[in-house]
Amino acid sequence: MKDLFKRDVAAVSNIMKLRFHPLVAKSAKGVYIEGEDGKQYLDFCSGWGVANTGYAHPKIQKAIEEQLNKLSFASTCSLISEPVVRLAEELIQRMPGDFEKKAWFGLSGSDANEMIYKAIPIYTGKNKIITFVGSYHGQTLGSYSMSGHPMLSKDYGANVIKVPYPYSYRCPFSDKEDECGQFCIKYFEDYILGMAYSPDDIGAMVVETMQCDGGDIPMPKGYLKAVERICRKHNILLIVDDVKIGFGRTGDFFSFEYEGVCPDAVVLGKPIASGQSLSAVVGRKEFLDVETGLHLFTTGGSPVACAAALATIEIIESEKLLENTKRMGEMLMSGLRALMAEFGIIGDVRGRGLIIGVEIVEDKASKKPAPRLAQMISYRAYELGLLFYTVGIYSNVLELMPPLIISEDDVGKALSIIKEAIRDVLEGNFDEAKLEEFSGWGI
Ligand code: PMP
């Protein structure tokens, strides 16, 4: 293990690293990853939200193997194949809205958001896009520009206007959730659209319905509906970035369903093909047809990845994963709320379904973010056999995001490890020097 770790340090570029501990993954099954050392790790990050159906699901393996044997590859740019067309039809049929729709396919959340970044000005004839402070939309230039997370937001984005996200725990206007929501909407509507910019220049608003890498912060009730109302009033496209939480993570198939909102397009990625590289944009036909060949990738939307995505949808249905997500999410949430009552360093616990953020602070009164403590807890939990990472604009939020197939036993096990990890760190039973090689988000 040490050897592979050192070889990775020597040979693999740091540009692609976001590391929290030295785990070398050897194999994985269900909700467990086996380390090179033979130890089993309970995965509460699902490989950054990808392994929603767990690892090595037999139906995913079967779908991939059958498709590999039948047609191992065909570039969707220039050839037609059945799994690709079938997946497009399936996604179109699931997307709400009484209008004609189409689907586009790529390889990652970033390239899918890049697609909308290119298509919005061409389709709308308007060059500005609104996004949220704290948002994460990707690492390619356009998706990077739209992002408001401090790791991504510094250098680009001249045509992007970033408005405050309703983060009620730290809202400069009010820490009451409904007041924070009302103030943020008012600021957006009256000042950003009313005074600072002309709505006539704004092509689209791109939103995460729950800010994930920004700190796992759900929107206050009614907020998404208010955003939709404003977009409709000013003829601004509403596009939901569901890359991390679409396909069931919140307990709904699409994350925007809880407010009955109907976006013009949705961006999908991460879990949709259970680990095969696949992203999608599903939305208004005229938008998706804006210019032939505008944004294409040789291996984007491959038949094998699309077959895996069709199997993923089938598993969500047949194993009732939306129901399990809601049930296990409630159990995890109530266990974490109990820990919040016990430990002064847990300032807030929030989330939807099986994506929950635990905000680590120096103390409840000051709310001062404690990113170092959060990182220590994450590392200690890894030593105890539980994997989760830290997120947030201050890097101080423990993100708990297990596969949607998780059982009660494993939720219980995770809760007891989290408790033990916090206790160990607070009692000084953790050597901080271990973090030296692991900068996490580096902020
Ligand atoms: N959108 C959201 C909401 C994300 O969370 C992410 C990744 N964290 C992306 C887009 C980018 O996805 P990818 O890393 O697959 O390019």
Image (spheres, rainbow, N blue to C red):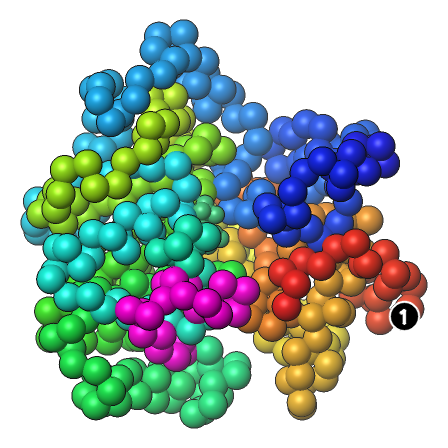
Image quadrant where residue 59 sits: top left
Q: Which residues are magenta?
A: 145-166
Mark 1 C-beta closer than 8 Å to ligand 1: no
Q: Nearer the viewer, residue 404 or 105?
A: 105
**Rendering coords of residue 307 (x, y %):** 35, 23
Q: Quadrant of the C terminus?
A: bottom right
Look at the image and say whether residue 156 sits in the magenta stretch.
yes
Q: Residues within 10 Å of mark 1 (few under 14, many from 20)?
A: few
Look at the image and say whether residue 359 sits in the magenta stretch.
no
**Rendering coords of residue 391 (x, y %):** 59, 62
Reading the image, the residue beneath label 1 is: 427
Q: Nearer the viewer, residue 267 or 41?
A: 267
Q: Nearer the viewer, residue 346 or 118?
A: 118
Q: Is residue 167 left or right of residue 261?
A: right
Image quadrant where residue 133 sits: bottom left
Residue 255 lies, with reference to residue 135, above or below; the image says above
Determine if residue 50 is in view: yes
**Rendering coords of residue 234 (x, y %):** 12, 74
At numbered mark 1, what does the secondary structure look like: helix, strand or loop? loop
Rendered residue at 65%/55% (across/down): 389
Determine if residue 419 is in view: no
Q: Is residue 441 left or right of residue 413?
A: left
Residue 308 lies, with reference to residue 338, above or below; the image says above
Rendered residue at 25%/59% (across/down): 239
Which amino acid is tagged 1?
Glu
**Rendering coords of residue 48 (x, y %):** 55, 47
Q: Is residue 139 left or right of residue 120?
A: right
Magenta span dominant secondary structure: loop
Rendered residue at 25%/73% (across/down): 227
Q: Nearer the viewer, residue 341 or 304?
A: 304
Rendered residue at 41%/18% (across/down): 63
Q: Quadrant of the N terminus?
A: top right
